[in-house]
Image: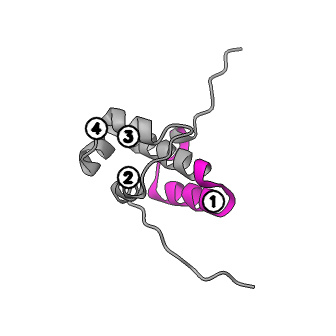
């Protein structure tokens, strides 16, 4: 039997799935997890499309969203906007 490697980007096929995935990572993950998740979302949508919308090159996007990368906040905001996301702050409940 032949198996393939699991790639979350294959399952991020709707805005709802993308939002649920990113919200879960934001709640439960750390900064590295969030950057990785944004990279998965960008891959699911298409790096070429994201590159066009952000004004960045594809290699720069891959580098900024790769494991261990420390992208600038402005890069994260550009990519989030390009994927149709936004950051929203809600008060914590006690």
Residue 4 higher or lower than 17, as above or below: above
**How far apart are the two marked residues, 2 and 4, measured between alpha carbons?**
12 Å
Q: Estimate how packed mark 3 is, as few (under 14), some (14 to 19) or many (20 or more) residues with alpha carbons within 10 Å.
A: many
Q: Are marks 3 and 4 in contact (CB under 8 Å)?
A: yes
Q: Residue at x 55, y 44 (%)?
A: 36
Which circle's residue, 3 or 1, is located before the other in the chain?
A: 1
Q: Are marks 2 and 1 in contact (CB under 8 Å)?
A: no
Disc assigned to residue 16: none
Q: Which residue is mark 3?
A: 61
Which circle's residue, 2 or 1, is located before the other in the chain?
A: 1
Question: x, y (%) of residue 21?
Answer: 58, 55
**How far apart are the two marked residues, 3 and 4, measured between alpha carbons?**
6 Å
Which circle's residue, 3 or 2, is located before the other in the chain?
A: 3
Q: Estimate how packed mark 1 is, as few (under 14), some (14 to 19) or many (20 or more) residues with alpha carbons within 10 Å.
A: few
Q: Which residue is mark 4?
A: 57
Q: Estimate how packed mark 2 is, as few (under 14), some (14 to 19) or many (20 or more) residues with alpha carbons within 10 Å.
A: some
Question: x, y (%) of residue 53?
Answer: 26, 50
> For the magenta stretch, what is the residue range?
10-32
**How far apart are the two marked residues, 3 and 2, measured between alpha carbons?**
9 Å
**How far apart are the two marked residues, 4 and 1, measured between alpha carbons?**
28 Å
Q: Estimate how packed mark 4 is, as few (under 14), some (14 to 19) or many (20 or more) residues with alpha carbons within 10 Å.
A: some
Q: Are marks 3 and 2 in contact (CB under 8 Å)?
A: no
Disc assigned to residue 75: 2
């Amino acid at each position: 039997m032949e198996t393939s490697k699991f790639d979350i980007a294959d399952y991020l096929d709707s805005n709802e799935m993308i939002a649920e995935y990113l919200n879960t990572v934001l709640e439960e993950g750390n900064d590295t997890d969030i950057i990785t998740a944004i990279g998965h979302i960008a891959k699911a949508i298409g790096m070429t499309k994201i590159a066009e919308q952000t004004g960045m090159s594809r290699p720069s996007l891959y580098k900024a969203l790769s494991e261990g990368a420390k992208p600038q906040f402005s890069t994260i905001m550009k990519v989030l906007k390009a994927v149709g996301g936004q950051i929203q702050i809600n008060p914590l409940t006690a």
